[in-house]
Image: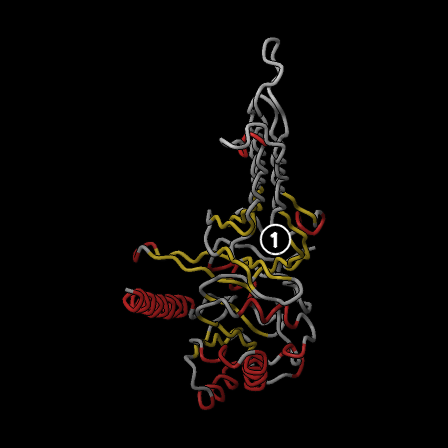
Amino acid sequence: MFYDEVKVSISAGKGGDGCFSFRRAKYEPKGGPDGGNGGRGGDVYIIGDHNKADLTDYYFKPIWKAANGEPGRGSNQHGAGGEDLEMRLPVGTILQDRETGEAIAEVVEDGQRICVMRGGEGGKGNTMFKSSTNQAPREFTLGKPGGGGDFKLVIKTIADVGLIGFPNAGKSTLLNMTTNAHPKTGAYPFTTMFPTVGVLEFPEQYERITLADIPGLIEGASENRGLGHRFLKHVERCKVLLVMIDMQGTDGREPIADIRVLMNELKLYKPGLVRKPILIAANKMDEPDAPENLKILQKKVKEPLFPISCVSDEGFPELKQALLEAVLEVRREEAALLESDEDDAD
């Protein structure tokens, strides 16, 4: 089972209590205060880890807590700070408030470390309250609680290219043939039950892009039918969309109708999705009815169209180069936008 959304309860550590103590020595029966301070509670960090595939660890262990600070002791000994909690998450994971759905933080890079909760301050020992007018203070304070609450962890796959299409359009086969990923393939609906990300290398250009094989889409996905929203939320983070179409028209569906349904579902879920760069891979061109169906598509679609066959490798070089160029263009646009924002901030 693949867990891409789980509920968790997370707490930072409580600060240790301050100590109430007076120095006691053989020849000093009324020694001054020597109560130490409590240690600070541990903080909570989320860390991006490309070795983490899903949220299984957090499904089976939903309660996470950083260590409390140690209490202060006599002889002015301060308590040790609590150990921080580090939650290692798949890259592309968002921490959301469970009640409001508000995004608290997200990890978008491997090794990225974000503090999401601070531990409570340690209490003050009575030594801290000593003054010229109060030589024997009896005041001390307790440690403060750390932050915490109920949250959701949600993976939104980050990939340069999202492969979308009806079940069994050939997305997993394409990913197998072009990248280092090896998703399960088979001739039945929803073979891909969760996103699989592979890397497409371009050694001569010293470039690489990532492709995500996203679970098959069906009509009504925007209303959460089939894999519904679990599919569509992964599309949001992709720079470019590659729509895979079965040119044979399996199960009585026409390729042009498939394209219209896919585009409509994207638009219904979030209108901005159809404004992403979209390429169409006309797959299974080795099938008997494919050439005639291709002629129809060429007349009716405006998106770049690439006839391919996962059996004969037809059209693969052209498609891969087009994907690279589309991704690089988006990267340039994002870099320019970031630079503009930084200039405005200055």
Residue at position x 49%, y 59% in the image: 177
Mark 1 surroundings: few (<14), some (14-19) or many (≥20) residues within 10 A: many
Q: Nearer the viewer, residue 257 or 91?
A: 91
Residue 329 x %, y %: 33, 70
Q: Nearer the viewer, residue 143 or 253?
A: 143
In the rendered view of the protein, which quadrant contains the N terminus? bottom right
User: In the rendered picture of this protein, how many numbered marks are placed on residues?
Assistant: 1
Residue 299 x %, y %: 45, 90
Which quadrant would residue 101 be assigned to in this image? bottom right
Residue at position x 69%, y 76% in the image: 225
Indicate whether 223 appears above or below 337. below
Residue that mark 1 sits on = 54
Residue 7 x %, y %: 68, 57
Residue 170 x %, y %: 56, 68
Q: Nearer the viewer, residue 121 or 196?
A: 121
Indicate whether 88 appears above or below 251. above
